[in-house]
Each structure stands twice: as structure tokens, then as C-alpha cells.
Image (tube, grey):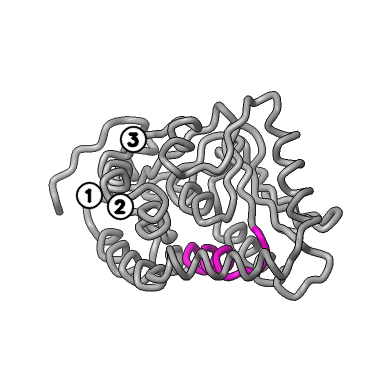
Amino acid sequence: MTDGLDVRTEAGVLRLRIERPEQLNAMTAPITDRLAEELEGAAARDDVRVVLLTGTGAAFSAGADVSGTDAHEGFDVTSLDRANRLVRAVVSLDKPVVAAVNGVAAGVGCSLAVACDLVVAAESARFVLAFSRIGLMPDGGATATVAAAVGRVRAMRLALLGDALSAQEAYDAGLASLVVPDVDFPEAVEETVTRLAAGPPLAFAATKKAVNAATLGHLEDALRRERTGQTILLRTADVAEGMRAFGEKRRPTYHGR
């Protein structure tokens, strides 16, 4: 059992729910590791036909947990490696992975959602690549997956400006597969995973492999570039200022150092 993560398997569906609603389901190291372990292990499980990722409360996931004083000191290359391992597990799994985006998906939480095969979003959900707000660049493969979904121009807007997209805007841009009113969201999620669990697993595996090869063939290169760039940025005064400002709920002042 990992605190903050509910894991259960029902009717062919491996359900992974982040349960840190007071922290907007920000992901800790143990949660990220456990998510990756469950996804990696699902490949060999006959009782799993589809994986469902979701959150509890007002957020899918606000991304990495950057709360606390001098939070930047707790981030290093191991944080990036954890995120990369998780995204690799989602993309390489030969079974469908569904993100049920119940609320805000920000930072690496957004990266995780977009890496999934289907994204079912509640109407009140929001998608935001919030990295630049704290002096960082997108990671978790987002420089590849988001660009593949929405194109270079929109990807640049999302990454540089950190603008939030509503669920409908995300759908129109190509980040979400389905948007439904909040009241219908649970039913839509269940219908989606039920259909997938009853579908042809070999066909699904072949389809996922082919589509990802056609659209995400450069994912590994992107993960390496993100790791290098983020490692450098994490050592800067700008990131320290960005994370402190986030914790203090004020606008950061950047000096390019």
C-alpha cells in the first residue's frame, strides 16, 4: 500500500487513483514509483485488459509536489527519472491506458494525462503545462506528446505562456479524446473502460504500437533532451525564485540566472 494512491483491479480494469485531494493530487516520489510499478507489472497480468488513471477531488494531478520552503532543493535528476519511467510505462504498455481527467491536470500531471491512449475529461477539467511558471521546461515527454497532439504552434503557446485550456479547448486542440458534463463523467469513464476491457486485446496492442511508432518515434530523444535541460534549470536562481513564489502565492521575478 502506498499512501495517497488507491490500487484495485475489477472486471479487467486496473484502477489507479491518486488520493491527495488537499494537495490537488500532487505526485510524491512513492506515488510516482508505485504508478510506474503497477503499469510495468500490468503487461504480464492476464486479469488486466485496460488501465485507468484518475484523481480524487478537484484535480487529476497538479504535477510534482513543489510545496514547502526551498522546495527546489528537493528536486534533482531522480525526479526527472521517475517521471520518465512513468511515461515510458504508459506508452510501452501493450494495453490501453485511459486518463480520466476529473479536474485540473497541470505540470507533469498534464504530461501523464497526454501520454495516455484515451483522455476522458470532465467539462470542468483544465489542462496546463505550468512548468514555465516556476522557471522550468516541460518534462514527462510533453515536448513530444503535446506537440504530436496539437502541433508545434499550439505546443509552443502552451509551454511558453503556461495558459490553461478548458476541457473543451483541450478537446478542440486534440489533447482530449472525449469531454462530458461533470454529472455524466463517471458514467462516461465506466463506459469507456468497459468497452476496452471487452475488446480485442491483440488488436488493441497492435494498434497502440503502430500509432505510437508513427507519432512518438522521437519520444526517447525528447525524454533525454528534457532530462538534460531540466537538470540545468533546476540549478538556477530562477527556479528557486519560481518555486518560492509558488509557495508564497505571489508573482515571481526572474533575472535569467
Give the magenta-colored segment's residue range: 83-96
Write the residue at 46% across / 52% down: 111
Q: In which quarter of the image is the C terminus?
A: bottom left
Please give the residue where the numbered disc 1 appears in the rendered image: 238
Q: Which amino acid does label 2 sit on?
A: Leu
Q: Is residue 241 in view?
A: no
Q: Which amino acid does label 3 sit on?
A: Asp
Q: Where's residue 249, x and y in %?
A: 36, 31
The part of the image, by quadrant, that contains residue 244 is top left
State the residue in front, 122 or 73: 122
On screen, 141 above or below 63?
below
Q: Distance between the residues labelled 2 and 1?
A: 9 Å
Q: Estimate how packed mark 1 is, as few (under 14), some (14 to 19) or many (20 or more) residues with alpha carbons within 10 Å.
A: many
State the residue in front, 9 or 237: 9
Tell which residue pokes out farthest to the right in this image.
11
Q: Earlier in the sequence, mark 3 or mark 2?
A: 2
The part of the image, by quadrant, that contains residue 198 is bottom right
Q: Residue 163 carries which label?
A: 3
Q: Which mark is residue 136?
A: 2
Q: How far apart are marks 3 and 2 (CA)?
A: 15 Å
Q: Is residue 156 left or right of residue 52?
A: left
Q: In this view, does 207 lie to the left or right of 50?
A: left
Write the residue at 31% across / 68% down: 225
Q: Where's residue 34, x and y in %?
A: 65, 63
Element carrying mark 3? loop
Q: Is residue 10 in view?
A: yes
Foreground: disc 3 or disc 2:
3
